[in-house]
Amino acid sequence: MKYQYTYRTTASELWQLSMYYIYGSMVGLCNIIFTVAVIALMVSRWQAAAAWQRLLLVAALSIFTVLQPLAIYRRARRQAARIQTDTTLEADEAGIHIRVGDQRADLKWSSITKVSKKPTMLILFSDTSHGYVLSNRVLGGERDEFYAYAASRAGKGKN
């Protein structure tokens, strides 16, 4: 089986990747706990709160629901703007072959440590913090088929 995808990662895809990473970590759990606590405070104290206290509660609620996602999106837009060439990713029995401009990398399946399936993308990890992102936009109708193929091969292969 052989798969080939040519794409350029967008700001939206980089933003989604960052949000998955944050909310899949201990930091995200703390963000959720803080947000739920602020909502509970708002529900229980809103009527008795002074105007400045209400403003403070709304500001606190905005930190992780509005401000953080906006800041992450701004960073993703800057990252996406620096991407000047398309990426071509080919997957076959030998492994993953990546071409970005005139640079090439060939990875055996044994070096792919994990294939992560997120709602809007697949991530092929070559170590704990590096990988290749394939969004649903890029994969199209082959998403589930490619995921099954890559997951069955990851960490395996001929050395």
Image (cartoon, rainbow, N blue to C red):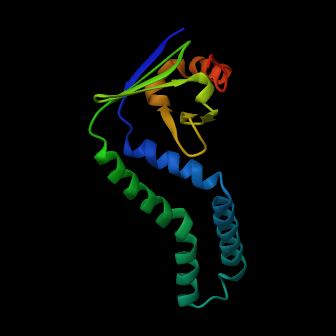
Q: How many marks?
A: 0
**Residue at the far front in the pictured view:** 159
Position of residue 147 in the picture relative to residue 43 (left or right):
left
Q: Relative to 59, does residue 76 appear above or below in the rendering? A: above
Q: Residue at x 52, y 77 (%)?
A: 59
Which image quadrant for residue 120? top right
Where residue 79 appears, x then y in whole percent?
Answer: 36, 50
Which image quadrant for residue 124? top right
Which image quadrant for residue 97? top left
Where residue 98 appears, x then y in whole percent?
Answer: 42, 26
Pick the residue in front: 153 or 106: 106
Quadrant of the rendering where the C terminus is positioned: top right
Pick the residue in front: 131 or 135: 131
Quadrant of the rendering where the N terminus is positioned: top right
Q: Residue at x 39, y 57 (%)?
A: 75
Position of residue 83 in the picture relative to residue 3 (left or right):
left
Pick the residue in front: 41 or 109: 109
Where residue 111 appears, x then y in whole percent?
Answer: 59, 29
Where residue 36 appears, x then y in whole percent?
Answer: 69, 67
Pick the residue in front: 92 or 69: 92
**Residue at the far top in the pictured view:** 1
Q: Relative to 109, does residue 56 appear above or below in the rendering? A: below
